[in-house]
Image: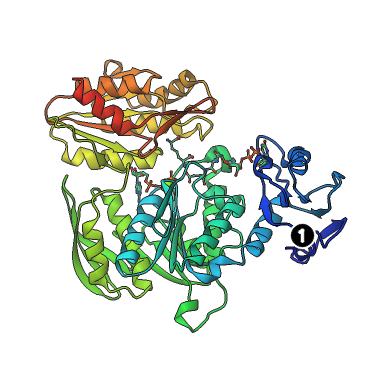
């Protein structure tokens, strides 16, 4: 492709040098920029891509997209906003792949991974070729690539993945859309078929600053849904909204897409769960929809998973998948990796690994466990570093409310002092009036898990929260191998 072709994408841009310069690849990371590539200079949070342009040119980059003239001996396309330009360029370079498949985005504070997983199962069981993008892995055809990057990829990586999916004839791509992804324009250029909203509770205030701005970021997914009322079913757009969530009303107004709602409490929801019966083995409910009513028995536990199932059902019904088929698929799901996952090494108490890492996630996980607990509830948890600090005491308060014993430990401290993160959690535990003799603080997560398991008596439940499927612990930028499930198994065997 020639550089001048990209200049035509943006009205406010300026070409310096030979516009006919051909490039054969696009990169934002100088370390990967090879001969013949176009290097995009992105100003980041830690460093500025412009500072790496010279390195990229040295490695063979033949042209640059920049926000200021760099004069490095190669042609430059100077743009106002490199991040926005990246999204436009990525979409163009990869040939607008989201137009060649049906893209379903799931956003919300909690439940994105679970909902995408359920929807992918339903659609693939219905005979469609599916792709998946989320923070456990990226699935392209039958290839699974573990996702070590962000939940929602940068636009360049995202469009590249969508191109691969489109090329192998993928019918549906189901992806998690994070608030960072929306705010940083990572999904600009994505033509979404459907947006699904799960819920909005506190998280990521370090990034968004206020709940209002966090709310507004989530709303972007819905304001983006098509404005072009195509009568052809293939061109229709749907906003699948949780009718029990206050934010849904506004998201419904933001979108031109057809709104389909789901819920438990709101009787006006288009897809509802009635007569819910929950147990430690699973959940049964009557599913009342605009395409009939049927009963579902699923192995997923907790009221929050009823919501996740309803969101998936509503989105699948919009795709004309028969209700019986949908419920049949859901009844087969055992658990989603790292979400209320049982660790069984033959012990006489229950050990669960769950990804709850927000106050609401913990409230859901623990209140569900409390309903079934016959013995004590022992909870191991921590809070991630370089993330929302305001949620730390709240997480302390929630765990104190539902647990009999707490082991407060490190999650991913990242670049923060692990001891300080623990100190930020404690005021919430104290404010809840929790007995100081019933909690311990230790930055060593392995030790905390081992101690929790040593303490467990028959019929107790140990919840190890926060890291779910993660197979590493990020300490000062170094990812040390760590898997809560393996550590728990070892501790059980070592008892
Ligand atoms: C705050 C944030 O979103 N940061 C993301 C951002 O990093 P950054 O802006 O700091 O990038 P940077 O390191 O300063 O580099 C700037 C530019 O210089 C380039 N560079 C850098 C070094 C070099 O040697 N050569 C070079 O060319 C980089 O490739 C980049 O283009 O761009 C990086 C590259 O795409 C991301 O990996 C990184 O995500 C980090 C890992 C992150 O922690 N993100 C979190 C906050 C996040 O996005 N989370 C959401 C929320 C999940 C949820 O809902 O719970 C998610 O979607 O995952
Ligand atoms: N609908 C829901 N409402 C509230 N809590 C939920 C819901 N679904 C799951 N959870 C809790 O939140 C945790 C994370 O769930 P899941 O991974 O599906 O969310 P996510 O939105 O993908 O999270 P992330 O933003 O980190 O990608 C689960 O382990 C569970 O404890
Ligand atoms: N997508 C979330 C994951 C948090 C997982 C938890 N283990 C932590 O490190 O805080 C985030 O980036 O905030
Ligand atoms: Mg997720």
Residue depicted at x 53% and y 40%: 205
Secondary element type, mark 1: loop
Colour mode? rainbow
Looking at the image, residue 229 lies above or below residue 61? below
Residue depicted at x 39% and y 57%: 142
366 or 82, which is in the foreground? 82
Place of residue 278 in the rendered image (x, y in percent of width and height, measured from the top left): 18, 50
How many marks on residues? 1
Place of residue 97 in the rendered image (x, y in percent of width and height, measured from the top left): 56, 66
Q: Image check: 244 left or right of 287?
A: right
Q: Please identify the quadrant where the C terminus is shown.
A: top left
369 or 30, which is in the foreground? 30
Looking at the image, residue 446 lies above or below residue 187? above
Q: Name the residue under label 1.
A: 22
Check the image and name the residue furthest to the bottom. Answer: 231
Dot 1 alpha-carbon crowd within 10 angstroms: few under 14, some 14 to 19, many 20 or more: some
Check the image and name the residue furthest to the top. Answer: 437
Q: Please identify the quadrant where the N terminus is shown.
A: bottom right
Residue 123 sits in which quadrant?
bottom left
Place of residue 466 in the rendered image (x, y in percent of width and height, measured from the top left): 37, 35
């Amino acid at each position: 492709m020639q550089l001048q072709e990209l200049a035509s994408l943006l009205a406010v841009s300026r070409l310096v040098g030979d516009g006919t310069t051909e490039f054969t690849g696009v990169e934002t990371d100088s370390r990967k920029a090879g001969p013949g590539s176009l290097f995009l200079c992105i100003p980041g949070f830690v460093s500025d891509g412009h500072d790496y342009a010279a390195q990229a040119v040295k490695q063979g980059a033949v042209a640059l997209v920049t926000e200021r003239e760099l004069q490095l001996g190669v042609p430059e396309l100077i743009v106002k906003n490199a991040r926005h330009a990246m999204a436009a360029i990525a979409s163009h370079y990869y040939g607008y792949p989201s137009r060649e498949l049906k893209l379903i985005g799931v956003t919300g504070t909690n439940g994105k991974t679970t909902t995408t997983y359920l929807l992918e199962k339903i659609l693939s069981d219905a005979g469609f070729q599916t792709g998946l993008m989320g923070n456990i892995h990226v699935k392209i055809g039958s290839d699974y690539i573990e996702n070590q990057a962000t939940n929602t990829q940068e636009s360049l990586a995202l469009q590249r993945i969508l191109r691969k999916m489109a090329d192998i004839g993928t019918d549906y791509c189901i992806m998690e859309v994070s608030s960072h992804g929306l705010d940083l324009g990572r999904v600009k250029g994505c033509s979404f078929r459907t947006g699904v909203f799960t819920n909005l509770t506190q998280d990521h205030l370090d990034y968004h600053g206020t709940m209002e701005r966090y709310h507004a970021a989530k709303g972007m997914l819905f304001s983006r849904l098509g404005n072009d009322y195509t009568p052809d079913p293939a061109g229709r757009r749907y906003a699948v909204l949780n009718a029990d969530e206050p934010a849904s009303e506004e998201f419904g107004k933001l979108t031109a897409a057809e709104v389909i709602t789901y819920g438990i409490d709101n009787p006006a929801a288009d897809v509802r769960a009635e007569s819910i019966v929950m147990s430690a083995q699973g959940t049964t409910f009557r599913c009342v929809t605009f395409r009939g009513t049927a009963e579902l028995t699923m192995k997923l536990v907790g009221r929050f998973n009823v919501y996740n199932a309803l969101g998936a059902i509503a989105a699948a019904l919009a795709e004309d998948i028969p209700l019986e088929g949908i419920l049949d698929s859901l009844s087969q799901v055992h658990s989603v990796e790292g979400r209320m996952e049982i660790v069984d090494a033959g012990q006489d108490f229950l050990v669960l690994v769950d990804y709850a890492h927000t106050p609401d996630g913990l409230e859901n996980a623990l209140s569900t466990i409390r309903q079934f607990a016959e013995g004590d509830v022992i909870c191991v948890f921590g809070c991630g570093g370089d993330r929302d600090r305001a949620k730390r005491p709240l997480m302390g308060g929630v765990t104190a409310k539902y647990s009999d014993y707490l082991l407060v430990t490190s999650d991913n401290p990242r670049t923060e002092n692990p001891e300080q993160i623990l100190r930020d959690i404690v005021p919430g535990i104290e404010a809840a009036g929790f007995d100081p003799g019933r909690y311990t603080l230790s930055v060593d997560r392995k030790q905390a898990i081992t101690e929790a398991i040593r303490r467990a008596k028959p019929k107790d439940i140990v919840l190890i929260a926060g890291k779910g499927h993660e197979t590493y612990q990020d300490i000062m930028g170094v990812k040390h191998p760590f898997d809560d499930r393996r550590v728990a198994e070892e501790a059980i065997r070592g008892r």
